[in-house]
Each structure stands twice: as C-alpha cells, then as structure tokens.
Amino acid sequence: MAREIVVELPRTAYYTGEVIEGTVVVEVSRDVSSRGLYVDFTGTEETVITRQQGKQSRTYRSSATVVQWRLPLRGEGTLPAGTFRFPFRFQIPLHGLPSYAGRHAKVKYVLTARLDVPLWVDTTWSTEIFVFYDRPSVRTYAQPVRFRSSADGPQVYVELDGDRFFARELIGCRITLSNIGTARVRRVYTRLIGGEWARADGQEETTETYRTEVSVPMEQIRVGVPFTFEIPIPADVASSYRGTYSYYSYVLHVALDIAWGFDIVAQTPIVIVR
C-alpha cells in the first residue's frame, strides 16, 4: 500500500490568472495497484445563515462551484515500490473570486493530490490555496468618480481619480464645500464602510463588518474652493467581490458635522482589493 503522498509547492498564495507549478511525490513501500493519480483543484463559494426561533434554530445553506478541475498525472496500473515525482501545472481562473472568510459567506480553494487505491482507503494530501485578484487587472476599468450630498443647505462635492483601490493605498480626493451660509461646520470627516451580503436557501443577511473614520484637519478645510485630502486604506481589509450567493462591497462617505443639525453626507460605492 502507499505509505506517503505529499505535494511540493513554492507557495500557497496566487493571483487570478497565475500558474501554479508543483510536484506530487509518492513513496510506496511495496507494489501498489491503483486506478490513477490525480490532482484536484476545487473552489467553492458557501453561505450559511442561522435563524433563531424561540429555543429552536434552523440553519440555511447554499453553495456554488467557482472552479472544479481534475488533472490526471498517472493512469490505471501498478505503482512499484520506491519514490516517484510527478510534476504538474495549471492556471488559476482569470475570472475567479478572491479567497474570503466572513460571517455568513466564504470562498475557499483546495488543492488535493489523490492516489486512487481500489478496495482500500485512497491516499490523499491537501492544502488550502489563497487566491487574490490580479493587481494589473483591477485598474483596467477604473474610472473617475464625482458625487455630492443631496440635502438642501450646506453641500459637499467630492472628486476621486478612480473607483478602484488597493489595500495599504491612499484614496486621494478633492472636496468642495458650498452653501455653508451661517451653519457652523464642526468637522469634515471620511468614513469607509465594508459590508457582506449573503443569501442561503432563500434567506438573506446584510452585515457591516468593517468601518474606519478619519477627520480632515481643520487647517486643510476651505469653503468654496476645492481642497485635497488622502484617506488611508488599512492592510487588513477584505477584497471586494461578487459571487453567486454573496458579495462584499465598500461605501465611502465624506461628511460635514454641522453644529445643532444633521450631518451632511456624500457617498459612493468603491472597489477595494487586498
């Protein structure tokens, strides 16, 4: 019977469209009859929502296959005793989803090597592969963004050079305040909100999972003329994505804190990639 099977990989994190190259190493102590040696690469999007009804609860689940590939490395036959190496290579899907683990949704990729042994337990080895969006492709469809508040009275107008950003990057924006009149602006602040939406067997959940707020220094604020401000994006944010049963998205707020009044908010959706 097979004694050991392992996969040698240079790393476990890849970008969409990147090629994974590795080697399956099989070591057997004596001749083994097998139906074949395979490498499986599976990506799955899963959602789970639990509803509490009094003392009872019910869990709803949905799943979709992102990718499911099988790469045969050796056909049916007898594998003699010894150590054998089987190289392989395949490409991460260009339009795959990024790896994600949230409150109600997750996207997970698993690489498995399997020696199919008849009438015996198959010998397997597996590991999780972490997938990230290909960075150059993120900018491909970026476009300038212009948005403003909708309330009467004080107005805030914001300009962004693009709508797609990376973690650890600075979002550069130009802010114009107008129609301030006699209103007293106590501060101008930006708020970045990340949220997960999931659907499982007809049930839906929307969860805010990330929020960060930064105030604009008072000495930078001008009324009637544009002024610039840079909003830092932390390193630990999740990537935006849109799957079959879930998505993760971000909304950027630029707001005026008005004394003795409601905050004036301008907002727009943006894409952030880790």
Image (cartoon, rainbow, N blue to C red):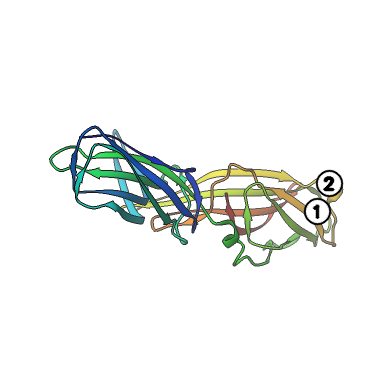
Q: Is residue 52 visible?
A: no
Q: Residue at x 69, y 61 (%)?
A: 149
Q: Is residue 88 visible?
A: yes
**First reached walking from the N terminus: tag 1 or tag 2:** 1
Name the spot of residue 190 as percent of width and height, x first.
Answer: 70, 49
Q: Position of residue 201 (x, y in %)?
A: 31, 52
Of the pair 256 and 124, the residue shown nearer to us? 124
Circle 2 sits on which residue?
A: 218
Q: Residues within 10 Å of mark 1 (few under 14, many from 20)?
A: few
Task: List x then y, in percent, for residue 234.
Answer: 64, 43
User: Residue 239: percent from the left, percent from the top?
Assistant: 54, 51
Q: Give me the residue at 19% from left, 38% from top.
A: 31
Q: Residue 10 bears which disc, if any?
A: none
Q: Quadrant of the N terminus?
A: top left
* Tag 2: amino acid: Met
Direction from residue 37 to residue 214 in the image, left or right: right
